[in-house]
Amino acid sequence: MTLDLGFTHRIERGRGAAGTTVLLLHGTGGDESDLIPLGRMLLPEATFIGPRGKVLEHGMPRFFRRLAEGVFDVPDLIARTHELAQFVRDAAEGYRLDASKIDAVGFSNGANIAASLLLLHPGLIRNAVLFRPMVPLEPESPPDLRDTAALIAGGRMDPIVPPEQTERLGELLRESGAEVMMAWQPAGHGLTQGDVQASKAWLEQRLGGGAAT
């Protein structure tokens, strides 16, 4: 049974509701099911929950508005980030998930709002895999991310995200105390098998062998 939590979403339970939950955040044009196959490849025993972004851009779902490619509507981003954070808390309570074991996997627009969650709601996400992210915003003061880790997966030939944006996000998270790993691929904006392999190995190392514990 799917609860009414303010977002259209999909939940797929793993082996035990008390284990790891992975928040799956799609890119522009995706939906709540878009990253489920990727989640299964990365952490097959985890519980997955995928919300659908509420903003439509030419009919394509996104998690927040942008003014142009690479230019974000920051007030909308902040409001949408707070709304998504509340969804995560409500989902943990409503589905009886362990709120201390929530990880995130985001691609493109989903990676950007995942990064915004880290910066505006420190402690909500334990580990984050960010595929092709940009800096979503610069917080007024650094959050406390000493208990957070992030893998930032960039494409060296990405026509959408400049490498300096990817590097700056890593610096921003490190300055806030997070453990950050950069994983570059000789690729564009799309995901590659190298992205999957690097993120799977990183998550397994972080979670102790890949079990949903």
Image: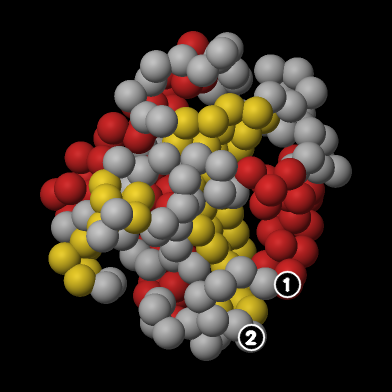
Residue 200 place in picture, x, y as percent: 75, 55
Q: Which of 19 and 8 is in front in this view?
A: 8
Give residue 169's quadrant in the image: bottom left
* Callout 1 secondary element: helix
Residue 109 place in picture, x, y as percent: 39, 58
Give residue 83's quadrant in the image: top left
In the rendered image of this protein, does residue 109 appear above or below residue 158?
Answer: above
Question: Residue beneath label 1, please?
Answer: 194
Q: How crowded is mark 2: few (under 14 residues within 10 Å), some or many (20 or more)?
A: few
Asked if residue 19 lies left or right of residue 110, the reply is right
Specify the farthest residue to the front. Answer: 59
In the rendered image of this protein, does residue 167 appear above or below residue 31?
Answer: below
Residue 177 can be seen in this image: no
Q: Nearer the viewer, residue 17 or 50?
A: 50
Asked if residue 34 lies left or right of residue 17, the reply is left
- In primary-sequence order, the first of circles 2 and 1 is 2
In the rendered image of this protein, does residue 194 appear above or below residue 98?
Answer: below
Question: Residue beneath label 2, please?
Answer: 186
